[in-house]
Image: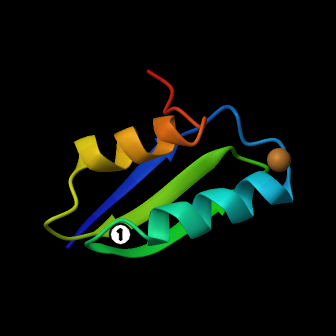
């Protein structure tokens, strides 16, 4: 199991938090997603077949790209 924390500057409100948590939870292999409005960070715990590439692609796909 791997835990990653990404900086996602587009998180603006609680709706963003909800959208991210819902969409990322649908990625195969993701165990938990915790998005935070104040810090604009997303913490994800996952296993294969999920990968960092897949998580970042999923976030970018819903218009919440990870900060470089
Ligand atoms: Cu929002």
- Give residue 1's position: percent from left, percent from top: 20, 73
Which residue is located at x 48 percent, y 59 percent? 43
Drawn side of residue 60 relative to residue 57, left or right: right
Question: Outermost residue, left direction?
Answer: 48
Q: Nearer the viewer, residue 44 or 54?
A: 54
- Above or below: residue 27 compared with residue 62: below
- Give residue 40's position: percent from left, percent from top: 68, 44
Kindly state the secondary structure of the residue where label 1 is placed.
Answer: strand
Which residue is located at x 28 percent, y 47 percent? 54
Query: In which image quadrant can residue 64 be found?
Result: top right
Q: Nearer the viewer, residue 55 or 9?
A: 55
- Above or below: residue 2 compared with residue 55: below
Q: Label 1: which residue? A: 45
- Give residue 59's position: percent from left, percent from top: 49, 43
- Image quarter (top left, top right, bottom left or bottom right) of the C terminus: top left
Drawn side of residue 2 relative to residue 34, left or right: left
Which residue is located at x 82 percent, y 58 percent? 15
């Amino acid at each position: 199991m791997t835990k990653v924390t990404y900086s996602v500057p587009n998180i603006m409100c609680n709706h963003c938090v909800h959208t991210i948590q819902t969409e990322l939870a649908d990625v195969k292999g993701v165990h938990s997603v915790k998005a935070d409005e104040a810090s604009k960070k997303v913490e994800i715990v996952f296993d294969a077949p999920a990968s960092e590439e897949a998580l970042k692609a999923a976030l970018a796909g819903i218009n919440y790209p990870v900060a470089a």
